[in-house]
Amino acid sequence: MIMRVNIGWVLAVFVGLSNAGSALTQERPTFRVRADLVSVDVSVRNGDLPVLGLAAVDFRLFDNGVVQTVEAVETEAVPIDVTLFHDTSPSLAGKIDALKADVRGIAAMLRPMDRLRLLTFDLQVNDVFGWQPAGGSLNLDSVKVGRISAIYDAIFVAMMHQPDLDRRHLIVALTDCEDAGSVVGSALIEDAARRAEGVLHIVKISQRPANIMNAPLSAVSTPADAKGEQRLESAAVRTGGELHGPSLTSRNDPVKTFKKVFDDYRQSYVLRYTPKGVVRDGWHEIKVEVPGHPRATVRARRGYFGGEKSGSS
């Protein structure tokens, strides 16, 4: 059974928490902090290849400029929750069968320990089948072309998921990045990314000629957002992800691009540390280096919100 998410209610909760100051850091920290333990997803790549086999001593991590001791490093053994958002804009009219094939192809890549959920939109954000164990049968009968392009709303809902302590959260949004009708604005998406407990990747799919005769009448249309794609990319980077645009010579293949993202995420590292020498509350800026691989590209989220108590740990 499809579940419809009331984005207005979710947004009201988020804004209320944002205005609550320290209450936000207690209820929705950017990272899960339990007994002062902070977890950070880190991708280390040399060109197109992952740098494998790194240990805690290979990383140098700064929390608000103070060097921290990395206590544990985990890799592929951690189960992953994958939130897949597939754009169902009216521009995709006549291409729903291809969309469903993409979703099934992506689901086939998950490991037995992983889970998948699919978000689309119509007049509200649709949680098509909730959390589905890998290998399960996917019910995609309810997937259809939406009447609005509520892209920001769907990405916002995806970032609000709070994964279990023993799981990681990967968000992959397959979209043309052209929103028209969301309650949430692109500026709030950028801000919410600092509090998300998942890594966001945005795969920009090129608009293709659609069968407009099959498109539903648009119920809502808002002016074009000149900064929308820029803010979506900024949101992804803040979580440790990125925006994958089509090249000059080819369009993004959703399944192939997801495989690249998922393989990179599986081979990335989860660093865990207990902050020392820094004030606990407020915003913490994180920087991660791998001194032994100076030419490697290191991608990690930009920071987290600490707990409500003041003082040094």
Image (cartoon, rainbow, N blue to C red):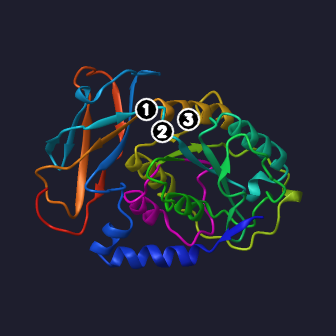
Mark 1 and mark 2 in contact? Answer it, CB < 8 Å. yes
The x, y position of residue 208, in whole percent, is 74, 44
In this view, the residue in front, 191 or 289, is 289
- Name the residue rendered at 65%, 31% in the picture: 256
Which quadrant is the C terminus positioned in? bottom left
How many neighbours does mark 2 have within 10 angstroms: few (below 14), some (14-19), or many (20 or more)?
Answer: some
- The residue carrying mark 3 is 262
Residue type highlighted by circle 3? Phe
Q: Earlier in the sequence, mark 3 or mark 2?
A: 2
- The residue carrying mark 2 is 78
- Give the secondary structure at mark 3: helix
Q: In the drawing, does residue 247 fall left or right of residue 94?
A: left
- Name the residue rendered at 75%, 54% in the picture: 91
- Give the secondary structure at mark 2: loop
Q: Between marks 3 and 1, how big is the CA–CA gap?
A: 13 Å
- Name the residue rendered at 50%, 74% in the picture: 11
The x, y position of residue 131, in whole percent, is 65, 54
| Image disc number at residue 306 | none
Relative to 98, residue 235 above or below: below
Q: Which residues are magenta?
A: 171-198
- Give the secondary structure at mark 1: loop
In this view, the residue in front, 133 or 92, is 133
Query: Is 185 within the magenta?
Result: yes
Residue type highlighted by circle 2? Val
How many neighbours does mark 3 have within 10 angstroms: few (below 14), some (14-19), or many (20 or more)?
Answer: many
Q: Between marks 1 and 2, how big is the CA–CA gap?
A: 6 Å
Q: Earlier in the sequence, mark 3 or mark 1?
A: 1
Judged from this view, the residue extending furthest toward the right is: 213
Residue type highlighted by circle 1? Thr
- The residue carrying mark 1 is 75
Mark 3 and mark 1 in contact? Answer it, CB < 8 Å. no
